[in-house]
Amino acid sequence: MTRTGAAIVLVVVIAALFGPVVAPFDPATQELALRLEGPTGLHWFGLDELGRDIFTRVLYGARISLLVGIVVVGVSATAGIAMGAIAGYFGGRVDETISRVIDILLAFPGLLLAIAVVAVLGPSLTNVVFALTLIGWVGYARLVRGQVLRAREFEFVQAARALGATTPRILLRHVIPTTLPAVTVQATLGMGAAILNEASLSFLGLGVQPPTPSWGTMLNYGRGHLLDAPHLTIFPGVAIAILVLGFNFLGDGLRDVLDPAAKRRV
Amino acid sequence: MLRFLARRLALTFLVLLGVATLVFSLIHLIPGDPAQAMLGEAASPQDVEELRQKLGLDRPLVEQYGHFVGGLLRGDLGTSLRTGLPVTAQILERMPATLELAAAAMFVAVMIAIPLGIAAAVRRGTAVDHTAMVLALSGVSIPNFWLGPLLAIIFAVELGWLPVSGRGTWAHLVLPALSLGAALAAILARMMRASLLEELRELYMLAARARGASRARAVLRHAFRNSLIPVVTIIGLQFGAVLTGAVITETVFAWPGIGRLLIQSIGFRDYPLVQGCILLIAVTYVAVNLLTDLLYGVLDPRIRFE
């Protein structure tokens, strides 16, 4: 499953990188006379409600999905590691404050908070990334806090402290590296979740705005043509499901290798 | 037990206060003048000023917050900008539809997950196990806003067995419940498998077999019952995901619940209604989490003495 996941992710990354080179059409070019036409030899995935080539738009959509995933996971993981490490290492009131903020944010169903934030800030790619990061860092912080609580008692950490290493050095060189295997697993699974959440927000009309090709937005517009042109719904959906499945396979496989203790929790 | 209860209730109070503060802040996150944003660019300055006064946006922030929390304690969430009706009444009217959908989705999920999880654990390492787990990972990966339309194409459009949207009969509930319950079924099946595998290794299983119990009886009467504790917890904790998923499923199937009301009110920039919907979903989620924790404390005494 790990290899299948890695292969899927690799294929989508290549498609996203080289999409504009291999795409047969421009994603914005409209052939209104052929609108809603089903798959043909020329247009493999058919045409959408404005006569745009769906295969091309699915290729370009991969860029948006991966971009959102990378930025959301990158920023969330960095912020989460920092907050979790500070809470776990210092303990006391600092830990109490950060932990209560985590509790409050975890009390919200994640996507609901993202919907709320985007609803007030307005629909856009930047706001989607901001909203998903706002809910994303909490999971990493909780994970890292738990790991740091354990790691700070390790002998090599105490030895570094005894040798007079500064706190930032102890955290960056000794404590945080011990949390990275678990964070890597969470980040891989987090890529799938971020991609799914972006697609959900775009599907609700709260995410990426047209004409930018996003898989969720394509599904949103396909909804109006479920009866007469189901291909508008089928292909972007398959793309989302396959990429998310790829990250989930990969994350699951990495967990078995990097974080075997967590396997029992699933 | 009392100490556990007091600590858990204090945390819930803090979380609820945080949830209320976040929901209150939403209106102040609107870029520019919130009253202008709600009425649109074409609104006259007089109308904007009137709305500002009506929502209390002209008063100091602390006073606005006090008024908001006071209203919450009285069950007053303000009035809808679009209909002029109390937000609480509108939400309560939609609540049964959402709860019905969430309950049906959870029922579907449990009915799929438990046999799948048991089969995977009992036949560990075989094709049955691999198939069940690939199915489970697929269930988590397939977006419900795609599964819903797909099910509608097959069962409503092509086969004509079920209605494509709306609420009314049992038949209307089937497709939304299936599409909403699929992801939860996948998570529960994985949990069921992991939990049952732990129990199958226990010595009491060996003892049951030594006393002459058949493998099926030992699994179902002994291991299965013990393995349910973490599964019940996950069912409770996943309630939030089901509620959020309902926002999407209700939109796909035109199901007249709170989720659909939320998306419609976002479209109309009816922010008091948006705040009300979000608050109610979050509070329901917090309440279910509290109940789950307390139930877990009752079921497993180790938790409450930690």
Image: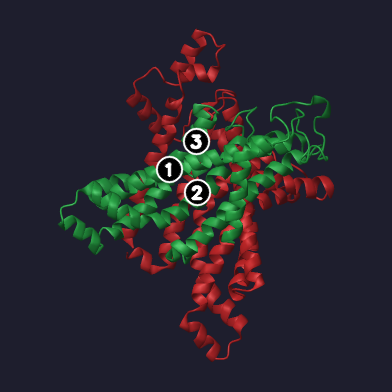
Chain colours: A green, B red
Q: Position of residue A165 (x, y in %)?
A: 19, 51
Q: Residue at x 34, y 57 (%)?
A: A178
Give SS at disc 1: helix
Q: In the image, is residue B142 above or below residue B257?
A: below
Pointer 2 and pointer 1 on the same chain? yes
* Residue beneath disc 1: A76
Q: Amino acid at mark 2?
A: Gly
Q: In the image, is residue B78 above or below residue A236?
A: above
Give SS at disc 3: helix
* Residue beneath disc 3: A129
Q: Amino acid at mark 3?
A: Val
Q: CA distance from mark 3 to mark 1?
A: 10 Å
Q: Position of residue B229 (x, y in %)?
A: 49, 67
Which residue reaches farthest bottom?
A: B211
The subunit carrying tag 1 is: A
Q: CA distance from mark 2 to mark 1?
A: 9 Å
Q: Position of residue B128 (x, y in %)?
A: 66, 71
Q: Residues within 10 Å of mark 1 (few under 14, many from 20)?
A: many
The subunit carrying tag 3 is: A
Q: Amino acid at mark 1?
A: Ser
Pointer 2 with pointer 1, Cβ within 8 A = yes
Q: Residue at x 35, y 43 (%)?
A: A101
Q: Is residue B221 left or right of residue B67?
A: right
Tell me which corner region of the image, top left, top right, bottom left or bottom right, holds residue B291.
bottom left
Q: Residue at x 54, y 91 (%)?
A: B211
Mark found first going from the N terminus, 3 or 1: 1
* Residue beneath disc 2: A190
Give B41 or A81, whichever is nearer the viewer: A81
Give SS at disc 2: helix
Tell me which corner region of the image, top left, top right, bottom left or bottom right, holds residue B16.
top left
Q: In the image, is residue B28 above or below residue B166?
A: above
Mark found first going from the N terminus, 2 or 1: 1
